[in-house]
Image: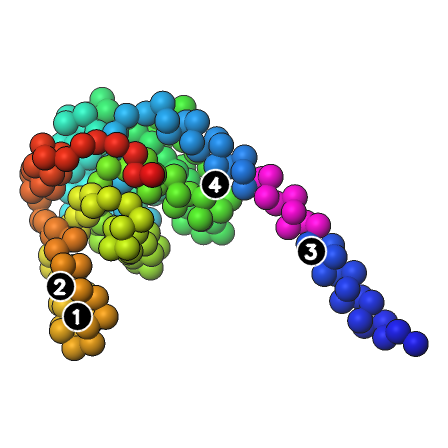
Amino acid sequence: MVDKNIIRKQRFWSESQAQSSWSIFKIMAEFVDGFETMARIGPCVSIFGSARTRFENPFYNLTVEIAKELSKEGFGIISGGGPGVMEAANKGAHEAGGISVGLNIRLPFEQHDNPYVDRDKNLLFENFFVRKTIFVKYSQAFIMMPGGFGTLDEFFEVITLVQTKKIAKIPLVVVGRKYWQGLFDWVKTSMYEAERNISPEDMDLIYMADTAEEVRDYIKDFYSKNKLAPNF
């Protein structure tokens, strides 16, 4: 006699597999929508940072200034489309008359549209991995403002892609020496010097800055010597 529990498990597995097959089409639709929208936009810079950064925080205002400076240089600004640093990035682009892109995602907390994203450039994603792909493909530089786990996840994934040569070397800028210095001291002393888990040239992938002018000049200098193009 066949165990009823086994039958239930097999039925559940079959139903789950069927749902997984249909989810492929939803994922494809997200990619198509993202690619078609972003392909119409010129060179962009992505700015990552905390959704919890309040407008009275100095890093909020610094993000606004960075976005303004890069917008004046002709770069579109891409953020996660939500509040905090993301809002500041889009605000700077908006106030400078530049292109303001939001790659938003459905989350149970913190995330909502900010009012500074261009309405025709406000994309909403269900899947983090699709959203990350759009960030990576269409950004010619990445800036990491102070943030939390999500900020680290996004920025270090890009570092890994550059390190492994899955994408060409591009400007990777960390803003806020006081905030980030402890992390990158650990990267140097523990990850590199103590354990040799990265190579010495990997330490040169990241540029650290404190002002909007430093960020602007570093990215301008990089692209005075390198070609602007999508990353893959």
Expressed as whole percent of the image width and height from the top left, the position of residue 42 reads: 28, 25
Expressed as whole percent of the image width and height from the top left, the position of residue 121 reads: 38, 28
Distance from the alpha carbon under mark 3 to that under mark 2: 46 Å
Instruction: Name the residue: 48% across, 37% down.
Output: 31
Asked if residue 90 shows in the view, the reply is no
The residue most toward the front is: 165
Distance from the alpha carbon under mark 1 to that under mark 3: 43 Å
Expressed as whole percent of the image width and height from the top left, the position of residue 73 reads: 14, 27
Expressed as whole percent of the image width and height from the top left, the position of residue 105 reads: 45, 43
Nearer the N terminus, badge 1 or badge 3?
3
Element at badge 3? helix
> Which residue position holds label 1?
192
> Which residue position holds label 3?
16
- Tag 4: residue type? Phe
> Which residue position holds label 2?
200
Nearer the N terminus, badge 1 or badge 2?
1
Question: Is residue 25 on the magenta stretch?
Answer: yes
> Which residue position holds label 4?
125
Determine whether 157 is above or below 135 in the image.
below
User: Magenta residues?
Assistant: 18-26
Asked if residue 221 shows in the view, the reply is yes
Q: Nearer the viewer, residue 201 or 140?
A: 201
Distance from the alpha carbon under mark 4 to that under mark 1: 36 Å
Element at badge 4? strand
